[in-house]
Amino acid sequence: MARWLPRSTDLIRFCQKLNRVKTLEDDMMETSFNRCLSTIDLTLLGIGGMVGSGLYVLTGTVAKEIAGPAIIISFIIAGFASLLAALCYAEFGARVPKTGSAYMFTYVSVGEIWAFLIGWNVLLEYMIGGAAVARAWSGYLDSIFNHKIKNFTETHVGVWQMPFLARYPDFLAAAILLVATAFISFGAKVSSWLNHVFSAISMGVILFILIMGFVLAQPKNWSTQEGGFAPYGLSGIMAGTATCFYAFVGFDVIAASSEEARNPQRAVPRAIAFSLGLATGAYILVSVVLTLMVPWHTLDPDSALADAFYRRGYAWAGFLVAAGSICAMNTVLLSNLFSLPRIVYAMAEDGLFFQVFSRVHPRTQVPVVGIVVFGLLMALLALIFDLEALVQFLSIGTLLAYTFVAASIIVLRFQQQKGDVPAPAASGQPNPEPHEGPSRGELKEYESFSDKLQLVDRDKSKEHREPGQLKAAFEPYLEFLSDFYPGEVVTVAVVTLMVSAICLCSVLVFGNTHLHLPTWSYSLLLVLFSLGFLLSLLLIWAHEQQHSTLTFQIPLVPLSPALSIILNIYLMLKLSYMTWLRFAVWLLLGLLVYFSYGIWHSKENLREPRPQRVSARYVVFPGGSLEERVQAVQPSSQAATGLPDTDTNDCNR
């Protein structure tokens, strides 16, 4: 039985395969895509991804059922929480201007299997999100014509009474997705131009809503006679924050488009900041005018803005609101169809997904195979499936991606940069003399133990320390950590921080409701896991970060990403158990794809050196002694590491 068990070396090698990181090219600006997008193009893409139907539907729902007029505070808090995640994306998008968004960011810092799972979840997120928006688009347009399209389809096609299927096939939703797919396949410039048109109309309608809304505003609608400003209290504000947080999902389209930006180092951070700021301002101001125009408890959750204008005697304004809503949904559709094929392309280009999706059209310079295939799949989802039960799946995929990107920022910031690790001297080069100082890029061989002690003392006395090393101020107290390789302690601390955050949020969410913990144990667990979270944070902070670069860097690392991590985990645990069950099934399917295809076709797997056979020659001399001459054929990667040549390693026996 023992011979069938895997050896420890095999298990270590297998784990190394799972956690290998992507090797980036020296020139990251080189690409097969067309770098044609400016800061304005990226900003409007981000606005289109965030300001969708939520502005016209979500504001009324949250204001009436969850937070009241205090939805304004909910949007402010949600905007700040989204800013933490957006800044992480901004730093990565500037430093790694490659398509792939959260998948690529995780691959270059955390590991391969984690990157694949993130990409796998984002893939489904975009597919369901695009199909759901298409069905909402068709339903909104159908409601303008008194549901004539729905009635005609049910009469002439029929009604389905099957689980997971829609009540009737939505041909209009499938058609709009096919039309959008055709436009996206024409190239990034055409997609950007179309997004400009719809975004301009949408922003014009929003400006009209704000001007007319402030003209018709009545401050008495916030008075105590109408229930006050915060009728649901602090709990309502925080519950509204959790719902409003999802309104800002969509800025990652900017990071996914960084490989098509002209100057991604400047354009990506600016576009994310501008789009998030404008989207937050739009949500806050629309919430203000909506709750000031009519009492919050009389709002119609399905069409709050149009109904508010109708009740104030401006029924014609409802048509403008409907036009703005449809244009906003169009921008979200374009955002989903624009991002999804590029993430699939990045996975296929790295060998983790089927190679056919890495083909780029030579004229339009877009991944046309991915656009067509996933556009058709999205149209099929919108045509026949009931997506209401799957909409919550969008949240868990997005929050998981945010969590891993935030963790990746911490890991990457405390890693040594590419040029920081000295390259060993090539085989056959003479080693420098002991009295000579080692130059950059060379290794100095120290013959005696005293020489090594001098090296250690000289390194400790240096003021400049590499990223991932313990800060000099903490060395007298944490000297035992100095023996670890730079970045190792930080990686362990990040894992501990995430585990502590999961345990802490689990106690907060389930401690009183599902677990029914006594007060003393509830408080004790909160204190213990909070201490674990804070100690991990302090341990990370005690190490040196990378020095400032020319690209954007998120401030207050590791505090800012850590806050984003704990917030995202808290929101994930608030989702229903059915969402987690579907998520687990989808993860299992992803692991099946990865272990049957991705792990074997990964480009990083092809870069790994193959083991070489070692041959030994034995020669018997007349004196009766046996001389062993070992010849080891080393790959070129080992030959450059300065290992001693074993070709002349003779042993007399």
Image: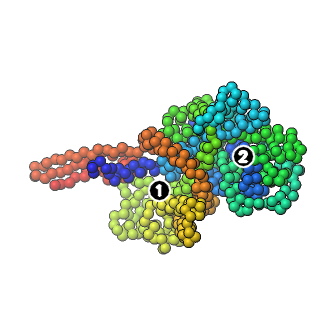
Rendered residue at 68%/40% (across/down):
133
Name the mark on residue 251: none
Q: Work out whether residue 188 or residue 446 is closer to the camera in this orientation and state it.
A: 188
Picture quarter containing residue 553? bottom right
- Left or right relative to 457: residue 540: right
Neighbour class for label 2 at 10 Å: few (<14), some, many (≥20)? some
Looking at the rendered structure, the kind of residue marked 1 is: Val
Instruction: Name the spot of residue 13 as percent of width and height, x first.
Output: 38, 50
Q: Kindly tell me whether residue 645 is visible in this rendering.
A: yes
> Coloring scheme of the render?
rainbow
Q: 360 above or below 240? A: above
Circle nearer the N terminus (1, 2): 2
Rendered residue at 66%/27% (across/down):
157
Rendered residue at 57%/36% (across/down):
32
Rendered residue at 27%/49% (across/down):
1
State the CA–CA distance, disc 1 to disc 2.
48 Å
Looking at the rendered structure, the kind of residue marked 2 is: Gly
- Left or right relative to 578: residue 236: right
Name the mark on residue 54: 2
Quadrant for the C terminus in the image? bottom left
Q: Work out whether residue 10 or residue 454 is closer to the camera in this orientation and state it.
A: 10
Most extreme residue toward the bottom, as rendered? Answer: 476
Q: How many marks?
A: 2
Instruction: Name the spot of residue 516 as percent of width and height, x first.
Output: 56, 64
Instruction: Name the spot of residue 320 as percent of width and height, x first.
Output: 82, 39
Instruction: Name the spot of residue 485 as percent of width and height, x first.
Output: 44, 61
- Judging by the rendered image, the residue that carries numbered circle 1 is 421
Neighbour class for label 1 at 10 Å: few (<14), some, many (≥20)? few
